[in-house]
Image (cartoon, rainbow, N blue to C red):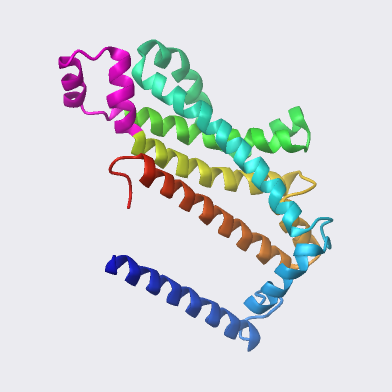
Amino acid sequence: MKARTKYTLISIISLILFILLWEFLSQTGIVSARKLPAPSKLFDTFIYKLSNKNPDGGTLGEHIATSMKEALLGFFFGIAIGVPLGICMAWFKKFDMFFRPLFDLIKPIPPVGWVPIMITFFGIGIMSKVSVIFIASFIPATINAYSGIKQTKDVHMWVAQTFGAKNRQVLFTVAIPSAAPMIFTGARVALNGSWVSLVAAELIASIKGLGYMIQTARLVGRIDVVFVGVLVIGVFGAIMMSTLSYLEKKFVKGGRR
């Protein structure tokens, strides 16, 4: 507890020092305020964007809601399909033989590479972004679930079989619980990939969202709005990562602390 409190205090102090240094560099003109707006300026812009739609046609809340909806839909669908597929590929040989060639074909393709294809199929609406985010989440979720099942120790399965457990019981009582830490690791990687892919997709083709807000602000020279968009993405990404870590602590025996 003392170590955790000490770490928290050091983190807060380092963040405060960083903000103060940033403010000093911008306010004194050492770094041009046009290139690096001061934190105080960004706070004013943040308040401004909460109710004002300039210069991108939407308030900050509207852009956040759009991006969150797209990111969470794609992420949840990617996890919901990727995790069971990875488990089945690792546990059932015929599943692996059937799906492995197709999975190995799409695995090396970067999620951003799918953006033009999804725009062709679905236009610039929500489905194109959700589809790209789905792929970005699906790949790491499948890989980590597969690896987690494959890393299940043989001795644990032998013990379960010795006590009369059938194949299905071994899977659900031994293999999947043992693979849970890897599955949550895949979820964290998938979440990070979903944010990266979302912003990339919105930068290319969108009419609302944080990526669209950043791109529009850049084109009209509003660097303060660009920074606000980037910082909001970072904050929400950190919140969701913390939520996943909390769930892992609650549901995974021996999970990260």
Percent x, y of residue 33: 69, 79
Percent x, y of residue 145: 40, 30
Q: Is residue 14 magenta?
A: no
User: Which region of the structure is painted magenta?
Assistant: 150-179
Instruction: Tell me: 20 left or right of 56.
Output: left
Residue 175 drawn above or below residue 60: above
Instruction: Tell me: 243 left or right of 133.
Output: left
Residue occupying the point 76% across, 64% down: 49
Q: Is residue 163 magenta?
A: yes
Percent x, y of residue 186: 43, 38
Residue 5 falls in image quadrant: bottom left
On the question of residue 120 being in view, the answer is yes
Residue occupying the point 59% across, 47% down: 195
Residue occupying the point 67% across, 42% down: 69
Residue 199 drawn above or below residue 156: below
Between 213 and 13, the one lying in front of the other is 13
Residue 197 falls in image quadrant: top right
Percent x, y of residue 249: 36, 46
Between 69 and 212, the one lying in front of the other is 69
On the question of residue 133 being in view, the answer is no
Instruction: Tell me: 177 left or right of 32.
Output: left
